Image (cartoon, helix red, strand yellow):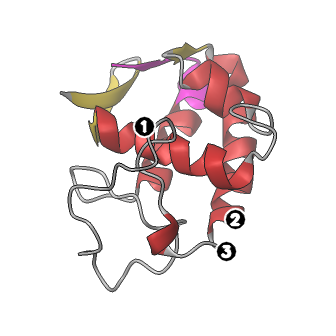
Amino acid sequence: MGVGINVGDFYYEIGSEDFFHSFFSTISYHLEPEGWGTKYPFLMNEFYQGSLKWDLSTKLIEELKDAHRRLQNYKPSQVVWNIEDSSLEPPWGDNISSDITSLANYFVTSDGEDLIEVLYNAFQTSYNEKENIEIG
């Protein structure tokens, strides 16, 4: 089943549920040593639960910028497909593009867009349009 983000009349295609969960699993595993949502509460708890009010979108942008910067320090081989089951691996295994140089640019949507850029755009649209964000 596919996942996307709705912001008013705007829709941002993401990809599979497993792919989307992997992005958050990777962030939590590597960047939140105290556990899920302890460093990035708006991104990991509020947004990931399915929706967020538009006036909090600036918090999402701040947290995403920090996570993006920090993910540059991790190799693509350090991706976490599912934080609840570390034995699971991405369906493509290690067969990734040579353009992927770190976990900061590892995640690409089903439309071929950088996931972090798509999230930035959705969060900024939410703020600009004063529209809530929903995962659907």
> Could you say which is closer to the camera, residue 101 or residue 91?
91
Within 10 angstroms of label 3, few (less than 14), some, or many (20 or more) residues? few
Residue depicted at 40% across the width and 77% down the height: 100
Q: Amino acid at mark 3?
A: Asn
Instruction: Name above or below for residue 59 compared with residue 29.
Output: above
Which label's residue is closer to the chain start, 1 or 2?
A: 1
Viewer can see residue 132: no
Quadrant hosting residue 32: top right
Span shown in magenta: 126-136
> Could you say which is closer to the camera, residue 15 or residue 33?
33
In the rendered structure, find residue 21 and report the number of the disc placed on it.
Answer: 1
Q: Amino acid at mark 2?
A: Arg
> Could you say which is closer to the camera, residue 39 or residue 63?
39
Residue depicted at 81% across the width and 39% down the height: 34
Residue depicted at 63% across the width and 64% down the height: 71
* Magenta stretch: includes residue 132: yes
Q: Position of residue 81 (x, y in %)?
A: 40, 49
Q: Amino acid at mark 1?
A: His
Q: CA distance from mark 2 to mark 3?
A: 8 Å
Q: CA distance from mark 1 to mark 3?
A: 20 Å
Work out which quarter of the rendered image holds the N terminus and state it.
top left
Viewer can see residue 8: yes
> Could you say which is closer to the camera, residue 87 or residue 114?
87
Q: As drawn, is 73 to the left or to the right of 130?
A: right
In the rendered structure, find residue 75 and report the number of the disc placed on it.
Answer: none
State if disc 3 and disc 1 touch (CB < 8 Å): no
* Magenta stretch: includes residue 78: no
What residue would you read off at disc 2? 69
Instruction: Name above or below for residue 118 compared with residue 58.
Output: below
What residue would you read off at disc 3? 73
